[in-house]
């Protein structure tokens, strides 16, 4: 967890490096999330749509960013969290979730940090961008 007195603009959250996305991860996430879209778990369906293989659920990457945040602050400190899906994460892709403080403000007597967030693959492809506001 973070210490409020060391949070300033430019502070970087410790990166969350994820193991390559496996088919097992996709099947387990489909079950956990209730999202059984075959594009994420059936290679034949993915190929029929012109893709080489299945790809990860966008919400899986959003969950990784959520883990990045809750590794840094308690969940009850999160005031807002939003993302924009930018690219797909292919099976076997190796995502890294990152965050950086872009502002520190006082709101209603509470010190808050605004964070810029991203999930990036090993080849540099940004698959998800977002922002969050957390109480520090």
Image (cartoon, rainbow, N blue to C red):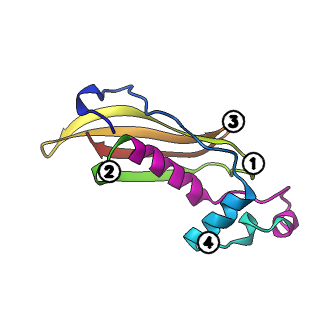
Q: Nearer the viewer, mark 3 or mark 1?
A: 1
Which residue is the site of mark 2?
78
Q: Secondary structure at mark 3?
A: loop
Q: Secondary structure at mark 4?
A: helix
Label 3, label 1: how many angstroms apart (C-alpha)?
11 Å
Mark 2: few, some, or many residues within 10 Å (few <14, many ≥20)?
some
Q: Position of residue 23 (x, y in %)?
A: 74, 59
Q: Position of residue 48 (x, y in %)?
A: 87, 68
Is residue 15 placed above or below 128 in the rendered structure?
above
Please give the range of residues in magenta. 44-71
Q: Secondary structure at mark 1?
A: loop
For residue 23, side relative to residue 112 (left or right): right
Is residue 22 placed above or below 3 in the rendered structure?
below
Label 4, label 3: how many angstroms apart (C-alpha)?
27 Å
Which residue is the site of mark 4?
31
Is residue 49 placed above or below 128 in the rendered structure?
below
Mark 1: few, some, or many residues within 10 Å (few <14, many ≥20)?
some
- Which comes before the other along the chain, label 4 or label 3? 4
Q: Position of residue 74 (x, y in %)?
A: 32, 48
Mark 3: few, some, or many residues within 10 Å (few <14, many ≥20)?
few
- Which comes before the other along the chain, label 1 or label 4? 4
Instruction: Identify the residue at image location x=30%, y=38%.
Output: 113
Which residue is the site of mark 3?
122
- Which comes before the other along the chain, label 2 or label 4? 4
Q: Main secondary structure of the magenta part?
A: helix
Which residue is the site of mark 1?
92
For residue 100, side relative to residue 62 (left or right): left
For residue 98, side relative to residue 124 (left or right): left
Instruction: Identify the residue at image location x=38%, y=33%.
Output: 101
């Amino acid at each position: 967890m973070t210490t409020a007195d060391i949070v300033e603009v430019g502070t970087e959250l410790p990166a969350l490096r994820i193991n390559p996305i496996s088919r097992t991860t996709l099947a387990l996430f489909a079950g956990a999330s209730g999202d059984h879209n075959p594009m994420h778990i059936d290679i034949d369906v993915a190929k029929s749509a012109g893709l080489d293989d299945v790809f990860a659920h966008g919400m899986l990457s959003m969950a990784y960013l959520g883990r990045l945040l809750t590794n840094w602050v308690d969940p009850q400190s999160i005031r807002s969290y939003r993302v924009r899906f930018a690219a797909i994460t292919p099976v076997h892709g190796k995502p890294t979730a990152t965050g950086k403080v872009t502002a520190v403000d006082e709101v209603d007597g509470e010190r808050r940090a605004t964070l810029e967030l991203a999930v990036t693959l090993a080849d540099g492809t940004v698959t998800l961008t977002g922002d969050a506001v957390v109480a520090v």
